[in-house]
Image: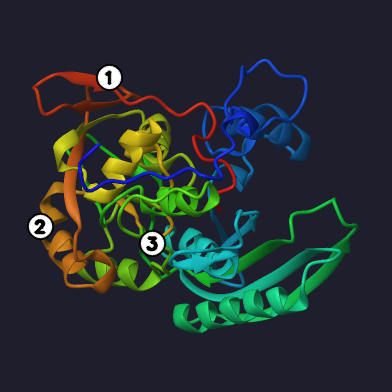
Amino acid sequence: MSETTEVRAGALDVLGWTCPAPLRNQPRVVMGHGGGGAMSAELVEHLFLPAFGGPDLAGTVDAAALELGGARLAFSTDSFVVRPLFFPGGSIGDLAVNGTVNDLAMSGARPAYLSCGFILEEGVELAVVQRVAEALGAAARTAGVEVVTGDTKVVEAGHGDGIFINTSGIGLIPHGVDLRPQRVVPGDVVIVSGPVGVHGVAIMSVREGLEFGVEIESDCAPLAGLVEAMLAVTEDLHVLRDPTRGGLAAALNEIASASGTGVVVQERAVPVPAAVANACAVLGLDPMYVANEGKLVAFVPREHADAVLAAMRAHPLGREAAVIGEAVEAHPGMVVARTGLGGTRVVDMPLGEQLPRIC
């Protein structure tokens, strides 16, 4: 820990912590099933997909691409259970908009409309509900989408956590845009839009009463404008992914597995803010596995990589974009990192979630 990093844990209840990624052979739902890692994937693959009708369903991607009336639509839904409701840089209301908007944007769509469902716990203060609703409305206006329908339910005290929110969204996919991991080929350049790990550390800092000498704010933001700037350079982007639960490591592993290519990351090229690196060192976390809410990772054909990177850096949400690696023929389906010391380590798919309830 650096001299400028300070940790205070006056209210830290270490004995109350639970493991978010326990053994996988479980007869009951555990926190790891909601972490966006291997346990989440197994739950979808072995329970939900067979129940819903099989592997051809779109449930394995963040947004489904659908044909309707001659138009290509993207459709997505997400639920938000973050604790606490308000954190540096945002709130559950901001997440409810930006999380769904970004899922649509990763398919290349221009997000247009959202639905919004509030599940309120009996006893929550109406002033808190109003604050969240106002944040959600402001985030929708910033993202350029409209909330056009919704629902409200109330559960008994002790059966919720203040406020849960579900949002669904639709958007229009421009002609010629085809973003999916199956298009990734060896030689593709891997670009990340900015520093990683910020959102997860921001949540942990306020949840556990930790201080790191400097306030760490969530990167929560809508990414559709950044994606449009990238597509203006070329429609031939291969895949985009927002590395939320499970962080950059989970996103890269999902793409490697679906594309059948290997991925090599230059560890020192991955942008990690000093404050995040220090916090992760204190908490025993790897920044590549920590959630983000305003970043994307792109696999871009090498011939377009320089122009796409320049367009990203010209956008406010991509100023610190960086090339971090490439897709390769070797070790298909596996992600490896080249360390600063010249070694290589495997970047596995996370089992569960290092920081549960972060979105």
Looking at this view, is 251 or 28 the one in front?
28
CA gap between label 2 and label 1 equals 26 Å
- 10 Å neighbourhood of mark 2: few (<14), some, or many (≥20)? some
Q: Earlier in the sequence, mark 2 or mark 1?
A: 2
The mark lying in front, picked from 1 and 3, is 3
How many marks the image carries: the answer is 3
What amino acid is found at the position of numbered circle 1 in the picture?
His
- 10 Å neighbourhood of mark 1: few (<14), some, or many (≥20)? some
The residue that mark 1 highlights is: 331
Residue 306: mark in rendering: 2
Element type at marker 2? helix
CA gap between label 1 and label 3 equals 37 Å
The mark lying in front, picked from 2 and 3, is 3
Taking the view exactly as shown, the residue that stands out farthest to the right is: 156
The residue that mark 3 highlights is: 217
If the image is split into quadrants, where does the N terminus sit?
Answer: top left
Element type at marker 3? loop
CA gap between label 2 and label 3 equals 30 Å
Q: Could you tell whether 307 is left or right of 123 in the image?
A: left
Asked whether the viewer can see residue 71, the reply is: no
Residue 345 rendering spot, x and y as whole percentages: 25, 20
Q: Quadrant of residue 215?
A: bottom left
Q: Quadrant of residue 41?
A: top right
Tell me which residue sits at (26%, 53%) in the image. Answer: 195
